[in-house]
């Protein structure tokens, strides 16, 4: 049992001024804290008032991290009581600033794990030490910082995305903060600005690739699996060349999912069902242009395709409805350097008589009813594109889901106005409601954070041995029917402040699917009771 300063210095146990007189006596805290005894509510009010004195979201993020590192219950109590305001502070879009500023603004390691690619022999010791006081390890969120949101390679600084994703797990799905490890694999960086920065806190070397990289990942997976047999591996923000390879390599061996591929995919499959409801046009009858055929773009296409197959289409029929546009225009057969995923969606080279070199060319030729942006290329959904789509489709879905805010393919405000209020719009980062001709349009946040917390929680609760297609599909359906879409302007997706409720539905659907697929490793008689029992609450 920790006492005195050791107790105060442990953020998972520290209650600060909320330690009672009895606890102060029992744990040798008398005189180590100010005299007054406060309730958690009083602490939340006082700390929230301090937070409000910071004028930028990044300053607020740093202040909240100091609370995180001091008193984890208080941190989650503050965020949990102001979800709508503070999710964008602890997560997207502000997390991008935390990643970019990690070395220059370094204060503390935030209880994260920093694995050094140059020393595979230390993986076991590091993981053991990092977890030695934890009652159990349910989940690892792992990044190597090569493809952080749309901001690219940030080396070791990507650790903040692992920290941020896990914070959202706790806020949204009640994942126990002492059962998780945020991990960065420090594989150097190819960003010269970081290599030249005297403050950079990572390995000052270019990224390892090829066999050496794969050997390291193998060793990490083997070691972590050996130490934590039931653990969920959540992979985040790996580079395009590695993300899908890691998923394919391990998906049948360990309990794992890739958030950018599958989390984003199920979130967009859910969004497409909402689009189908709002436009009275089933997912099987839409035509999809996906701009940015990378990790997220292909993941999204695959999950929407799966949904179309679930609704009766063959795989070949479903795939014919997708047009992937990448940096060289429409992805066509025979193009150089296509990824495996792009190859699967490549269109016949002779399909169009004119070159499809730009997104505008493709939109003109294909007349899509759905346009999804996963390119990280700002302002590429132009007025012309929006107008063409609106001319051809009564309720076109136009969905710039790249993050952070400044990299969105278009602004909700512009798209609503250019489409005269007809476009169904969601954005990856939060957008304010849009006023247009007397109607208020609420813009859903199409971020994988809507789905991955419940998906992960369902996997943890069922101790699923693998993550099956049915579990992913169940996650996508977990939030169906939450939204009433009958009014024009209604948000297509549940608002972020309902994340705990949405996550619970998703978790329950995932647990049920795991049981149906017989991949659960615990018996569960009452799914709702099991999910409820797993939810950690920010209370002393
Ligand atoms: N909303 C969400 O939940 C969510 C989830 C995952 C990713 N994303 C966003 O999607 C974006 C892409 O992420 P990713 O992980 O797929 O990255 P990625 O690097 O794997 O994919 C990006 C793709 O865009 C292509 N591209 C680059 N420039 C282009 C251009 N000018 N025109 C067309 N295509 C171009 C690249 O070639 C690549 O194939 C990021 O901004 C990220 O934040 C959003
Ligand atoms: O982190 C996010 O906000 C969503 C997504 O995982 C991304 O990479 O953009
Ligand atoms: Mn991501």
Image (cartoon, rainbow, N blue to C red):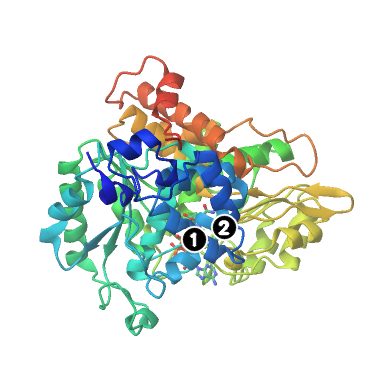
Residue at the spot of label 2: 51
Q: Residue at point 50% right, 42% down?
A: 77
- Of residues 466 and 369, which is closer to you in this image? 466
Read off the residue under disc 1: 63
Left or right, 164 with respect to 30, comes to right
Could you say whether the residue bearing mark 2 is in a helix, strand or loop?
helix
Comparing 358 with 179, the one in front is 179
- The residue furthest right is 438
Comparing 295 with 159, the one in front is 159
371 with respect to 247 (left or right): right
Figure quadrant of residue 102: bottom left
Q: CA distance from mark 1 to mark 2?
A: 7 Å
**In contact (CB < 8 Å): disc 1 and disc 2:** yes
Residue situated in front as seen by the camera: 241 or 146: 146
Q: Quadrant of residue 22?
A: top left
> Residue 256: image x %, image y %?
32, 43
Asked if residue 289 can be seen in this view, the reply is no
Residue at figure coordinates x 28%, y 51% from the top left? 5
Where's the N terminus, which quadrant?
Answer: top left
Which secondary structure, mark 1? Answer: helix
């Amino acid at each position: 049992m920790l006492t005195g300063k050791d107790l105060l210095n442990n953020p998972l146990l520290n209650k600060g001024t909320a330690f009672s007189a009895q606890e102060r006596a029992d744990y040798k805290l008398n005189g180590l804290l100010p005299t007054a005894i406060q309730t958690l509510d009083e602490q939340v009010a006082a700390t929230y008032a301090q937070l409000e004195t910071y004028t930028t979201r990044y300053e607020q993020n740093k202040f909240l991290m100091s609370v995180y590192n001091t008193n984890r219950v208080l941190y989650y109590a503050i965020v949990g009581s102001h979800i709508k305001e503070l999710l964008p502070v602890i997560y997207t879009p502000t997390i991008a600033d935390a990643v970019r500023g990690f070395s220059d603004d370094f204060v503390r390691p935030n209880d994260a794990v920093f694995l050094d690619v140059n020393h595979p022999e230390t993986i076991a010791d590091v993981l053991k030490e990092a977890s030695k006081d934890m009652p159990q390890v349910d989940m690892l969120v792992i990044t190597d910082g090569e493809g952080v949101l749309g901001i690219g390679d940030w080396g070791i600084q990507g650790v903040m995305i692992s920290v941020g994703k896990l914070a959202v797990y706790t806020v949204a799905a009640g994942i126990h903060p002492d059962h998780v490890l945020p991990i960065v694999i420090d594989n150097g960086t190819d960003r010269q600005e970081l290599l030249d920065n005297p403050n950079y806190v990572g390995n000052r070397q270019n990224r390892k690739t090829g066999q050496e990289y794969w050997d390291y990942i193998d060793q990490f997976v083997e070691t972590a699996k050996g130490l934590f047999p039931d653990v969920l591996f959540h992979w985040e923000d790996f580079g395009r060349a590695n993300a899908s390879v890691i998923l394919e390599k391990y998906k049948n061996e360990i309990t794992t999912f890739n958030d950018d591929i599958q989390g984003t995919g199920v979130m967009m499959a859910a969004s497409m069902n909402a689009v189908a409801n709002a436009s009275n046009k089933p997912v099987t009858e839409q035509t999809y242009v996906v701009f940015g055929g990378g990790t997220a773009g292909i993941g999204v296409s695959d999950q929407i395709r799966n949904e179309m197959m679930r609704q009766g289409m063959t795989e070949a029929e479903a795939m014919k409805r997708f047009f992937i546009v990448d940096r060289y225009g429409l992805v066509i057969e025979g193009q150089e350097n296509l990824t495996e995923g792009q190859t699967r969606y490549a269109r016949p080279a002779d399909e169009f008589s004119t070159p499809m070199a730009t997104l505008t060319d493709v939109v003109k030729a294909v007349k899509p009813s759905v346009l999804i942006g996963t390119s990280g290329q700002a302002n590429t959904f132009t007025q012309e594109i929006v107008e063409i789509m609106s001319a051809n489709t009564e309720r076109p879905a136009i969905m710039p889901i790249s993050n952070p805010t400044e990299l969105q393919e278009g602004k909700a405000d512009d798209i609503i106005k250019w489409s005269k209020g007809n476009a169904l719009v969601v954005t990856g980062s939060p957008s304010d409601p849009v006023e247009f001709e007397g109607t208020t349009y609420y813009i859903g946040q199409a971020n994988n954070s809507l789905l991955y917390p419940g998906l992960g929680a369902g996997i943890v609760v069922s101790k699923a041995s693998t993550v099956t297609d049915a579990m992913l599909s169940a996650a996508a359906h977990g939030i169906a029917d939450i939204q009433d879409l009958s009014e024009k302007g209604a948000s297509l997706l549940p608002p972020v402040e309902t994340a705990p409720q949405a996550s619970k539905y998703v978790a329950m659907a995932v647990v049920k699917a795991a049981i149906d697929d017989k991949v659960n490793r615990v018996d569960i008689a009452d799914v709702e009771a099991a999910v409820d029992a797993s939810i950690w609450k920010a209370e002393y």
